[in-house]
Image (tube, helix red, strand yellow):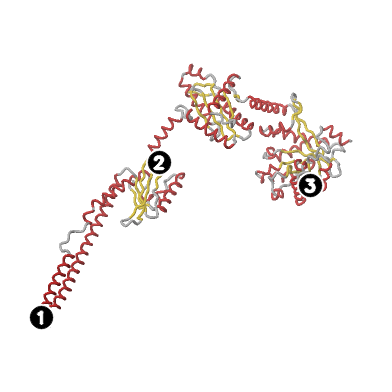
Amino acid sequence: MHAHESSGKQTINSSTAKPLQRAPEIFNVRQAYILIFIVCTLLMGIAQLLPQGSSFHSFGALSIFMGCIASLSLVAFFYLVRSYERHLKELRATKIALMQSESMFRSLAEVVPVGIFKTDEDGNCVFLNPRYLDISSQTLPQSIGLGWRKPIHVDDLAKVTTGWRILMEHGTPFSAEYRIEKPDGSLTWVYAQAQRQTGAHGELSGYVCSTTDITPNKAAEKEIQQLAFYDSLTGLPNRRLLMDRLKQVMTAASRTAHGGALLFLDLDNFKILNDTAGHDKGDLLLKQVAQRMKGCVREGDTVARLGGDEFVAVLENLSTNAREAARQAESVGEKVLLNLSQPYLLNGLEHHSTPSIGITMFDRKHDSIDELMKRADMAMYQAKAAGRNTLRFFDPEMQAAIAARNTLEADMRCGLLEQQFILNYQPQVDAMGVVTGAEAFVRWKHPKLGLVSPSAFIPLAEETGLILPLGAWVLETACRQLAQWSKAPKTRDLTLAVKVSAQQFRQQDIVAQVLNVLNDTGVRAAKLKLELNESLLIADIEDIIAKTTALSEQGVGISLADLGTGYSSLSHLKRLSLDQLRIDQSFVRGLLTNSNDAAVTKSIFALAQSLDLRVSAEGVETQEQRDALAAHGCHVYQGYFFSQPLQVREFEQLLSD
C-alpha cells in the first residue's frame, strides 16, 4: 500500500505541474522600472542644461518629477492586478488538481484487489472501498467510526490496538497479520499495513490502511507444516516433530527439576491383522489407537507415531520426587493399557488388540535423545517378553519398587477383607498421672511380612483411596471397644481419640457416618474424640466449620492435632467447635532444646487459654518434658514416658495394675 500510494502521488503531481507554473508575462515590471528611470534621468539632465531661473527650467523639472511618480504608480497598479489574476488562476488549478487526485484515488480504490480504508486523526474510519467491506463482511454503516475494529478476533485485538496506538503517537508505520471473525463464525486471515497521511504542507490529515486477505496463504502454510511434521494417517506428530518436542521437554526437565517420562508402545500381533483382514483395517486400527492414546494423556503431553504400529508418548512436568514421578508415569501407562485393550470396530469387524509398553524416566544426566529412545524400546521388549499386554520400566530398581508398591496395595485390599488390621491403644493421662482415656492406633498384621509400620501403608492408603474404608473400620472398631469398656467400672469413664484423615472428613456424609456408628454401638457421643489435622483447614474451611459444629452439637469432642504447621488462623479457630488443641510431638521433642519449639509451644498454650480450650501433648518421653508442659498448664499427656501403644488386653491390664 505504501509503495502504491507513493507512486500514485507522484503521478498526480506530474499531471498537474503545468497549471501550477507561472505564465509568461507580456509586460516585464523590472524592465519597465529601468526604462522609466533612464528616461527620467535624461529629462532631468536636459532640464539642468537650460538657463537657470527660467520658468521652463522650474516647470520642466517639476513636470518630469511628477511624471515619474505617476508612471511608477501605474506600473505598480498594473503589477498588482496581474499578480491577483495569476493567484486566482493558481487556486483554480490547485482545486482542479485536488479533485482529479481524489477522483483518481477513489477510482483506484474501487478496482484494486486490496481492502483500503482511511481514518481521521483520531482513528475514526471516514472512507473504505468495496473490497474491504467484502473482506470484513461488514456494511458501510457498521464500519464507519471505530466500527472497523469490531470484527477483529478477540485474541488479536490487543495486538492491533497497540500497533495503531504506536502509529498515532509516534508515526511508526503499522503492519501485522491478524484474524477477522465474520458473522457466520468463520475466520479470515488478513495482512494489514497502515501509515500517516499528510496534507500539502506536511500537516497530519489522517491515516490510510491496506488490508490483504491471506487466508489461502495460511491454509497452504498449515498444509505444508502438516505434511512436514505430522503423520498423514493418524494426524499425530511424526518422528521429526517428536524429536524436537522431546529435546524441549528434556531441557525443561533438567532446568526445573521436574520429572519426565517416555512411553514406547507397540501393538501386539498387528501384522496378523494386516495379513488376514487387509491393510485398510490395519489403518483404521492405527487411527483409533491414536485417538485413544490422546485421550489418556494430559494436555501438554505429546503422543506421536514413529511408523508402523509403534507409538510414543512424552510425559512432562511430573513430580520432582523420582518415585512419585515413576508412579505418575505408571498410572498413565496403565490407563493406556486399559483403553487400548477395549474392542475396536473396524468397518463392521470387531477386533481385539493389546499393547506392550516400555517406560523410561528422564534421569537428568543429560542423556541423548537416542539413548532415551533405546531405553524405552528395551523396556517395551521386556514387556513383550513378560507375556505382552503389560508395561515394564527400564530401571530395574524402580521396576522392583513399583512392583512392591502394587503388591502392597493388593495385599492391603485383601487385608481389609480378611480383617488383618488391629487397633492398639496408647494411654492418655491427666496432670495427676491418672489414665483418663486413650488414642487408637491402627496396625497391620501382614500374614507374610509380619507387623507392617503405619508409615509404610498409611501414605499408600491415602494415595489409593483405601484410607476411606480403612478409616471407617477404625472408627467402628474404636466405638465397639468403647461400648465394651462402658460395661466395666474401671474403664467406663474412659474417652477414646480417633484420628480422621482429611479425605475421610471431606466426605459429604461424614457426620452421618459418625452418628450412625455411635447409634449402632450405643456409645455416648462425649466418649468419642475426633482428631483432625491442621492441614485439613487449607481448603473449604466453611464446610469444615459446618461439620465440626454439627458433631459438637451432638456431643462429639473435636481436637485439632499437629497445631503449629501454619494452616489455621485465629479467626478460623474461633469458629471451629473445638474442645482441645493438641501439641505435635515434634514441638514436644524440642521443647527443652530448641527455642523455636519452645516459643511455638508457649504460643499454643496462650491461644488455648484465650479460646478456653484444653491442651493435650503427644510424644512425651521424659520427666523433664512432662514437667515443662505442666508448668504451662497442660491438661492431657501422652507418650512413651507413660506407655507405648498397647493391645487391648495389655491396656486393660495396665489399668488394673
**Residue 107 picture location, percent across and down:** 27, 48
- Looking at marks 2 and 1 on the same chain, the residue that comes earlier in the sequence is marked by 1
**Residue 124 picture location, percent across and down:** 39, 53
Q: Secondary structure at mark 3?
A: strand
**Residue 32 picture location, percent across and down:** 16, 66
Kind of residue at badge 2? Trp
- Looking at marks 1 and 3 on the same chain, the residue that comes earlier in the sequence is marked by 1
Residue 51's mark? Answer: 1
Q: Is residue 436 visible?
A: no
- Looking at marks 3 and 2 on the same chain, the residue that comes earlier in the sequence is marked by 2
Q: Which residue is mark 3?
A: 614
Q: Which residue is mark 2?
A: 189
Kind of residue at badge 3? Arg
**In the image, what residue occupies the spot 41% across and 53% down?**
170
Kind of residue at badge 1? Pro
How far apart are the two marked residues, 3 and 2, measured between alpha carbons? 70 Å
Q: Secondary structure at mark 1?
A: loop
* 238 vs 19, nearest the viewer: 19
Disc 3 + disc 2, Cβ < 8 Å: no
**Residue 487 picture location, percent across and down:** 85, 36
Is residue 201 placed above or below 552 in the rendered structure? below
